Image (cartoon, rainbow, N blue to C red):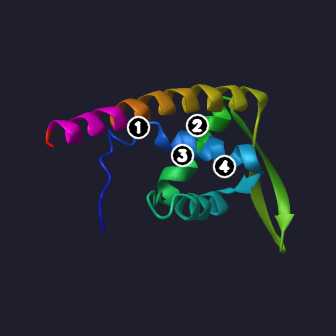
Amino acid sequence: MSKTNAAFMSGVPELLLLSLLAREEMYGYQLVRAIRVVSNEAFKLAEGVVYPVLHALEEKQLIKAKQRLHEGRTRIYYALTAKGKTRLKELTTTWERVSGGVAATLNAAEVAHV
């Protein structure tokens, strides 16, 4: 099993959670599973990572939480707010710029070694 550098992951959980919540309301463990599935297991964020990020996003009013009964159990579902949509756009733009820069640098390094 490979480990991910914590510094490298800074901000990634926020981006992943906001992105998934832009699609539909989800509860915590559903988000944990969705991150694994959608990322093809590239990201395996534990509940101990996801829930603190969800609480921080809620405090910043980027998401809202509401209790709902699901299969006889009360679950807390999270949904994106208008402020959360704006933050997602900002993070997406930053991610695209950074990942594009990394890809360009890696491609340039490969060309230099040919």
Q: Is residue 92 above or below residue 68?
A: above
Q: Residue at (48%, 60%) from the top-left corner?
A: 46
Cα distance between the residues tagged 2 and 3: 6 Å
Q: Which residue is mark 3?
A: 52
**Residue type marked 2:** Ala
Cα distance between the residues tagged 2 and 1: 14 Å
Identify the element where label 4 is drawn: helix
Cα distance between the residues tagged 2 and 4: 16 Å
Q: Is residue 111 magenta?
A: yes
Measured as percent of width and height from the top left, residue 68 is found at 84, 58
Front disc: 1 or 4? 4
Front disc: 2 or 1? 1
In the rendered image, the residue lying farthest to the bottom is 71
Pointer 1 or 3: first along the chain: 1
Cα distance between the residues tagged 1 and 4: 18 Å
Pointer 2 or 1: first along the chain: 1
Front disc: 2 or 4? 4
Front disc: 4 or 3? 4
Q: Is residue 52 magenta?
A: no
- In magenta, the rendered stretch is 103-112
Q: Looking at the picture, tell me which residue is in the foreground, 91 or 10.
A: 91
In the rendered image, the residue lying farthest to the front is 114
Identify the element where label 3 is drawn: helix
Q: Which residue is mark 4?
A: 20
Classify mark 2: residues with Cα within 10 Å, few (<14), some (14-19) or many (20+).
Answer: few
Q: Which residue is mark 1?
A: 10
